[in-house]
Amino acid sequence: MSKTTDSPRSFQEIILRLQSYWAARGCAVLQPYDMEVGAGTFHPATTLRSLGTQPWAAAYVQPSRRPTDGRYGENPNRLQHYYQYQVLIKPSPPDLQELYLGSLEAIGVDMALHDIRFVEDDWESPTLGAWGLGWEVWCDGMEVSQFTYFQQVGGHDCHPVSGELTYGLERLAMYILGVDHVMDMPFNDPQTDIALSYGDIFRQTEEEYARWNFDMADTAVLLRHFEEAETHCREILSAEHVDPKTGKRIIMAHPAYDQCIKASHIFNLLDARGVISVTERQAYIGRVRALAKQCADAFVQTRAGGWTPETAA
Amino acid sequence: MPDLLIELFSEEIPARMQMRAAEDLKKLLTNGMVEAGLTYASAAAFSTPRRLTLTVEGLLAESPTTTEERKGPRADAPEKAIEGFLRGAGVSRADLEKRDTPKGPVLFARIQKQGRPAAEIVAEVLEQTIRSFPWPKSMRWGSGSLRWVRPLQSVLCILSDEAGAETVPLTVDGIVAGDTTAGHRFMAPGRFSVTSFDDYAAKLKRAFVVLDPAERADTIWNDATNQAFANGFEVVEDKGLLAEVAGLVEWPVVLMGRIGDDFLELPPEVLQTSMKEHQKFFSVRNPKTGRIERFITVANRETADSGATILAGNEKVLSARLADAKFFWDNDLRIAKEDMSVWLTALENVTFHNKLGTQAELIGRMARLAHDLAPLVGADADAAEEAARLAKADLSSEMVYEFPELQGLMGRYYIEASGRPADIAAAAQEHYAPLGPSDDVPTAPVSVAVSLAEKIDKLAGFWAIDEKPTGSKDPFALRRAALGIIRIVIENDLRISLSKVLSNCIVGTLVKRAISSGKIKNPFETVEEYDKLRERLPETADRDAMDKAFLEVNKFEDYLSPVYFGLIFNEAQSTAGNLMSFIHDRLKVYLRDQGIRHDVIDACIAMEGSDDLALLVKRARALSEVLGTDDGENLIQAFKRANNILTQAEEADGVEYSYGADVKFAETDEERALFAALDTAETAITPAMQAQDFPAAMSAMAALRTPVDAFFTAVQVNAENATVRRNRLNLLSRITGICSSVADLTRIDG
């Protein structure tokens, strides 16, 4: 990438610029969800908020974990823990493509020198019972983002439709900063006294988690946790809508969805441990999807999901 | 006469859908307009990643006014009936005319349809087209309910003539049609208005948009080949990729880049696949080294640095991709050279089909079958078996995991690297062939044995578990497998009795299924008991199949009950018969394309030995040939006449006239001549059939036409004299008998 005076100098500067850019476009800048997830889409700010009729605009960084991608910190661009930047706007604005391109400019992509392309890529999440149409966005042949118009989530048709943008932060930043190995990427300002690289912060954890993910994670315990999360999710959703203690109508869609997220992550860990066969794999995905659907069913009966006493009556 | 210009401008349309969508737009619009009475001189459609465009020239300014007459009730019909008719026809009483008909006075209505201006019709048809457009996949966006392939942003719709252009008034889901469009997303993003198609195309070009996909493809191909040529290289042709890339850009700019030296030793197919699938790059070959050494990428814009930044970025992405590929290649080669058996062991955990076991089991079956087939195809049995064992080993390799389309080819590289003979390596690649009707069939004996084994095992397996293709559903590509067997056998002229091979395979699968389902009890205690059962079997039973099944069972340290064994055996026979008819049906389709009629094939299938496809086809070709001649065609008529008379007489008399025609009872010269001709024919046909010289046998048969015709003209078969009649019926039987030794002519149509 060509350096201009406006080029960002570190990984965190790119994140900060995205945060201010989307904040200036009216998005609520949220914080990461405090649970282990495989992708930014799992954050309830995307999954659940894309349901129902209430308008929504949010942007956030989401640390994401993909245990099978662990390479002990040695691979130049594969990590078991990485960051996604996620934007969700409902209804999708007519100029979402332009807004997105503006964000690339904001983080230092010179539109006059690069070749940006929208290449067909339909998105589907079998675990979330969700799909949408859109593109992967290419910058000089490299995929830098996913751009999706959600059509269905948790088995529900999306009305109105949300526009979702997902940036793979490490890959995008490496390209902008001209770094070949993720561990060499400056995390904070490289001119500062205590300059930290991505590797200074994450090389050790990549090693530790790779070893744990592949060889140590206790599969018996994980299998039990999976079952427990599944059972508890159903229990939560089967509770009376009216809380006997407060007398209020409280549907616990979010706590139930937490269990769904948990089950999904445990499934990923089991997959990395290699204890799930090809046929079982489909069955596990189906079980997580069933939970996601039930959580979606519950969410649309809450106020945030568009429920009002009037519509109910 | 006005011209019409329509542009549907949207966010990026998937490249693979553009061409079809432009054609659909043309078809739906022009059909709709013509239906409404609006005819035109010519129409053409274009597409870019962001627009579908239709231009129609010489449109009528308005649809013609038409008059239609409709017959109503009788003039003296009840008032209610007449009122109903008026309502239905949408006319008033003044439009009715009373006319006398043979049924009395009847009312007729004259319905006049007023012509409508083109704009009105275009607006209607366009809205209908947009709302019901046949996208393979469509979506909603924002708060709207309209569906389009990606958000539809604007509609341009103008009618223009010498006087100028007018916008067709139209609003679809909030989008108001206008006379403007936008240029290139980055190079000229502003909107501008247009007055005609020529104006539109010219302004678009100034705004860095080449409207015609064919022109974009030409530009890309010319620039690519020129750049390659100027540097002493040549571009590897790929029409599919060219069309796709032309659908990804509005302003194609061709850039040629380098492939890092580290990657030049990768197999060319790996380079090509990785570049094409992931990056949409063309491969560029150095004719001196024969290697792929450069790539062509097509950018969507010009830049101040002449694409230097874009090219550097693309080279970087490619290096990362190829670093992965090289990592896979190096790892795989190491395993191939050390010990490939770890790949085979890994396949023990990969399911082929839940009722047919793992890939490893499939390979075991294929290896045994290839061993058995080898002598029939001229291959060394041990080589064929080893080739079959290794043919699918590459499914465990990292490269094939990453690029499934390289299966077989990678196997060939890896087996070669392991130091095994070239024919064993080639079988890994060739055993999948033929993949399509125009794909080459394998000809090397070892490859032929493995390819046949793969396909026969597949068909037999899926038939044994009753997973046959139905209608358009053929998820396991069994029709293709059957056609593959047919083509390999015929094009290599192989002599194989398929029925026996099929039933052997099916018995094997059925026995295994029986064991795994726990149906097998009351075991044979000893081999002697099995031998006793074997003795009691009818002469026709396939003892090879039984022995194999018995050994198979023994491997599982279990035995079959004699009764159950018999059931399995019968089931295998009937399943194999059913599978053989399926193969025969595919053969009919295959031969029909070569101009051989289905009834001709039926006539040959009915003959013994028709599971030997090469023989069957020879017979069918000879029969088809002879039926094309005058003699042949007439002989069929004579044969049918003889057969009819004979059948009727046999039914009436309750006896079979099949023997003892004697020339001494002949009364006419024609009769005697026929006797002589039949003798001659028989002398020619019998040895010809033994030598499987069907053309000779068929032409000897066709030579019977003249004497048989003469016989029927001169002779009354059902003579008064019983002896003479019997003799003539027996003579007819000789005719049908001789003809039927060649083919079952009763099955010929007409």
Image: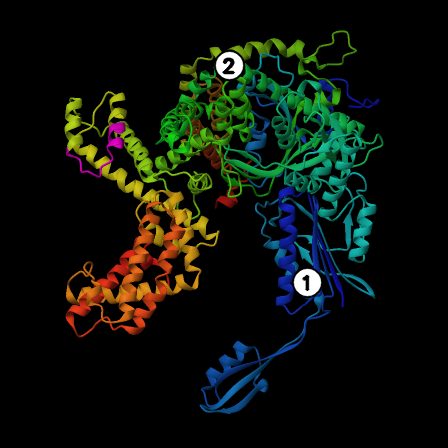
Using the image as rendered, state which of residue B562 and residue B328 is in the foreground. B562
Q: Report the residue at 65% width, 59% height from top.
A: B29
Q: Residues within 10 Å of mark 2 (few under 14, many from 20)?
A: many
Is the residue B314 above or below the residue B720 in the image?
A: above
Q: Report the residue at 59% width, 85% height from top.
A: B95
Q: Is residue B546 magenta?
A: yes
Q: Is residue B478 magenta?
A: no
Q: Chain of mark 2?
A: A
Which range is magenta? Answer: B536-549
Residue B641: name its quadrant.
Answer: bottom left
Q: Quadrant of the C terminus of chain B?
A: bottom left
User: Do the residues indicated by labels 2 and 1 lie within the same chain of the protein?
Assistant: no
The percent coordinates of residue B130 (x first, y second) are 63, 54
Q: Is A36 situated left or right of B173 in this image? A: left
* Visible residue check, residue B522: no
The percent coordinates of residue B489 (x first, y second) are 43, 39
* Residue assigned mark 2: A213
Q: Residues within 10 Å of mark 1 (few under 14, many from 20)?
A: many
Using the image as rendered, state which of residue B372 and residue B392 is in the foreground. B372
Q: Chain of mark 1?
A: B
Q: Which mark is residue B262?
A: none
* Residue assigned mark 1: B122
Residue A152: name its quadrant.
Answer: top right
